[in-house]
């Protein structure tokens, strides 16, 4: 399948950055520039410029992304929300490339039956076509949790939208809503890579108490919410420093 990847940085350890549901790799570009090595930012399958999968699951996403993970140098994978679960899956080594350290940022670890039912309902709906780009952009930003953080005319939104003969729709494949709740204990236990879990101090999706219940050593980023890498990219510098040190130390 086709996975769209942005690359940058310099020679050195590689960082693969995975975005959350409804976003695209572009949300990572500001934070990526603080990485002292090479970085790769793919669009998850069914998002942005990457093709959708025949069936969407955490494992299927990890398998589709495995070919873009470098194999010639130490590698860290940092994923946000849905991307964080995929990062943990890649840490198992079951999909080919060896990953040295994985980090899940802002992973929602507690789900209610109502939340899962709603997600399953959304997964079964066809993509809505909006009459204007503005309306589609508003929806795309709300799905990604970026409404109020990113203006609707931002280039970041462009890859999240598709113009059709009938109007505008989200690039997001609705099937991504149906991946379900992650089994965090199993994912962490199966990881051959070192695991770091993190969340923003003000993250309503993954409050610090939920994070620390899963990982008492989890990293709480002060002053930021769910999309910390967009709200305040510099807030991730200590986390990136920790990941880099684990690759070169």
Image: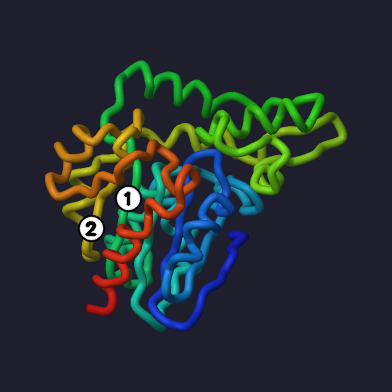
Q: Distance between the residues labelled 2 and 1?
A: 8 Å
Q: Where is residue 209 in the image (x, y as percent from the top left)?
A: 19, 33
**Exactly how many numbered labels are in the figure?**
2
The image position of residue 29, as x and y in percent, is: 55, 58
Reply above or below: 195 against 131.
below
Residue 169 image-quadrant placement: top right
**Mark 1, other Cα within 10 Å: few <14 / some 14–19 / many ≥20:** many
Q: What element carries label 1?
A: strand
Does residue 233 appear to the left or right of 180 in the view shown? Answer: right
Q: What is the quadrant of residue 128 in the picture?
A: top right
Give the image quarter of residue 142: top right
Q: Identify the residue shown where x is 39% and y is 47%.
A: 58
Percent of width and height locating residue 189: 16, 53
Name the one closer to the observer, 17 or 69: 17
Residue 123's place in the image compared with 4, above or below, is above
The image quadrant where one finds the C terminus is bottom left
Q: Relative to the observer, which residue lies in front, 56 or 68?
A: 68
Residue at horizontal 24 percent and vertical 65 percent from the top:
193
Q: Is mark 2 on a helix, strand or loop?
A: strand
Disc 2 target residue = 195
Q: As drawn, which residue projects farthest toward the top?
A: 114
Residue at image coords 37%, 54% = 236
Q: Is residue 146 above or below residue 36?
A: above
| Label 2, residues with CA under 10 Å away: few <14, some 14-19, many ≥20 | many
Mark number, residue 104: 1
Label 2 close to label 1 by CB (< 8 Å): yes
Instruction: Look at the image and tell me in which quarter the N terminus lies.
Output: bottom right
In the picture, measured across the screen, residue 23 lies left or right of residue 91, that is: right
Residue at image x 55%, y 53%? Answer: 25
Colour scheme of the picture: rainbow
N-term-proximal mark, 2 vs 1: 1
Can you give x and y, in whole percent of width and height, for residue 124 in the image? 55, 26
């Amino acid at each position: 399948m086709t996975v769209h990847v942005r690359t940058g940085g310099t020679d050195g350890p590689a960082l693969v950055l995975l975005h959350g549901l409804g976003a695209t790799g572009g949300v990572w570009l500001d934070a990526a520039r603080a990485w002292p090595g090479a970085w790769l930012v793919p669009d998850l399958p069914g998002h942005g410029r990457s093709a959708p999968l025949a069936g969407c699951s955490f494992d299927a996403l990890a398998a589709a992304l495995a070919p873009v993970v470098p194999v010639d140098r130490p590698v860290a994978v940092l994923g946000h929300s849905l991307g964080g679960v995929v990062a943990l899956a890649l840490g198992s080594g079951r999909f080919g490339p060896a990953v040295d350290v994985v980090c899940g940022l802002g992973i929602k670890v507690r789900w209610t039956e109502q939340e899962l039912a709603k997600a399953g309902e959304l997964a079964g709906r066809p993509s809505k076509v909006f009459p204007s780009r503005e309306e589609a952009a508003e929806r795309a930003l709300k799905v990604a949790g970026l409404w109020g953080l990113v203006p609707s005319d931002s280039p970041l939104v462009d890859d999240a939208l598709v113009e059709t003969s009938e109007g505008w729709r989200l690039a997001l494949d609705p099937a991504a809503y149906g991946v379900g709740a992650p089994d965090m204990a199993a994912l962490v236990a199966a990881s051959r890579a070192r695991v770091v879990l993190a969340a923003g101090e003000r993250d309503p999706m993954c409050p610090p108490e939920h994070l620390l219940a899963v990982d008492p050593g989890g990293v709480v980023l002060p002053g930021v919410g769910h999309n910390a890498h967009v709200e305040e990219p510099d807030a991730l510098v200590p986390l990136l420093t920790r990941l880099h040190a684990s690759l070169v130390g």
